Structures are given as C-alpha cells and as structure tokens.
Amino acid sequence: MRLNMVIELLDVPGQLLAALEPIGTLGANLVTVIHQREIKTERGLIPVQITIEGDTETLDLVMNKLNELGFRVIEVDGNILKETINTILIGNIVDRDVKDTMDQINQLKGVRVADLSLKMSEEPLHSSARITVEADFGKKKDVLAKIQNIGKSKDFLVISEV
C-alpha cells in the first residue's frame, strides 16, 4: 500500500532527517521526498511531500510516530486535513443572533462550526459562547479574520487563540 503525505517542518538543520527516521525504523519504504525550502506554509514552515509504502499497520505506526514527534501532517493522499480553531465571544450573543454568527462562519469555503457552547448570564452583555471551528488546513487566518469582523459588527469581545 502506498501513502502520500505532506508534513510541515521547521527550516532548521536536522528536521528532514528527524522526520524521515521513523519511516525506515518502523519498516516502511521511502518512495519519494520533495523538499523545497523556498516554499512556506501559512505558519512559515516548509511543506515536505513524502510518499511511503508498507502494509496498513506499518503506515499507521509511521503516522502515529510522526504525530508523537510533533510533526504536523497537513495532507494525506490528496485530502487536506482539518485544523481546529477555538474562539470565545462575549456580549449579547443570543439577542444579536447566534445562528447568523454561525451561518457567516460556515459561509467560508472549507470551514464549519463544529461545536458551540453558550453560557447565559442574567446580564445579557455578559453572556459568552465558545465556538469550535473545523477548517481545511491553511484557512485559520481567514477564519480568525471573519470572526473578528463578526465581533466588531455585533459588538462582541472576541478572544481567539494565537
């Protein structure tokens, strides 16, 4: 079985070797490596395309080991993996139409609100919502900008992850 993936690496000596080491150690065969230092991801890291071969169990072990070592796999077999973005909104959430807020976020391509937790307060301006968004890798900046714009238009305090 063959697996194509794209992982993100820091642009420092030894990163590529460290990412490739578990492949051989765990018994998979390395087929292709494409490493272009001049290309960067949204996070300023280098995307490295790797193709490996092995049985399903071996490929799963390799993927788990890469995650364990802190290497972010951003694409597998042409499928962009999702990233989770958490944001807190504080303000008059319900009266300013929480459904509209979610609909505006969901309008972004490759993005969906996966979870919403609402905390009501006797004082409506002190209500809060924690929104968890799933987005295609590389969409984080767009999602955070959209949420900031929504917050500004609805007079919400927006607390986003860095």
Image: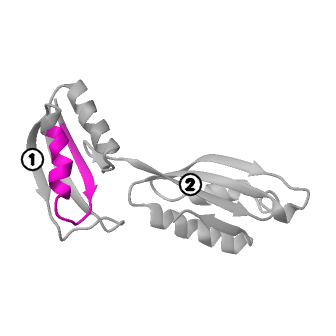
Residue 1 numbered mark, or none = none
The amino acid type of the residue labelled 2 equals: Asn
The amino acid type of the residue labelled 1 equals: Thr
Q: How many marks?
A: 2
Q: Quadrant of residue 150?
A: bottom right
Residue depicted at 17% across the width and 32% down the height: 26
Does 87 lie within the magenta span? no
Comes first in the chain, label 2 or label 1: 1
Does 12 lie within the magenta span? yes
In percent of width and height, residue 45 lies at 29, 64
Q: Secondary structure at mark 2?
A: helix
As drawn, 20 above or below 153: above
Comparing 67 with 43, the one in front is 67
Mark 2 to mark 1 CA distance (whole Å): 36 Å
In percent of width and height, residue 101 lies at 67, 59
Q: Quadrant of residue 159?
A: bottom right
Residue depicted at 78% across the width and 65% down the height: 91
Of badges 2 and 1, nearer the viewer stands 1
Mark 1 highlights which residue?
32
Quick check: 25 left or right of 154?
left
Mark 2 highlights which residue?
106
Magenta residues, as a range? 3-23
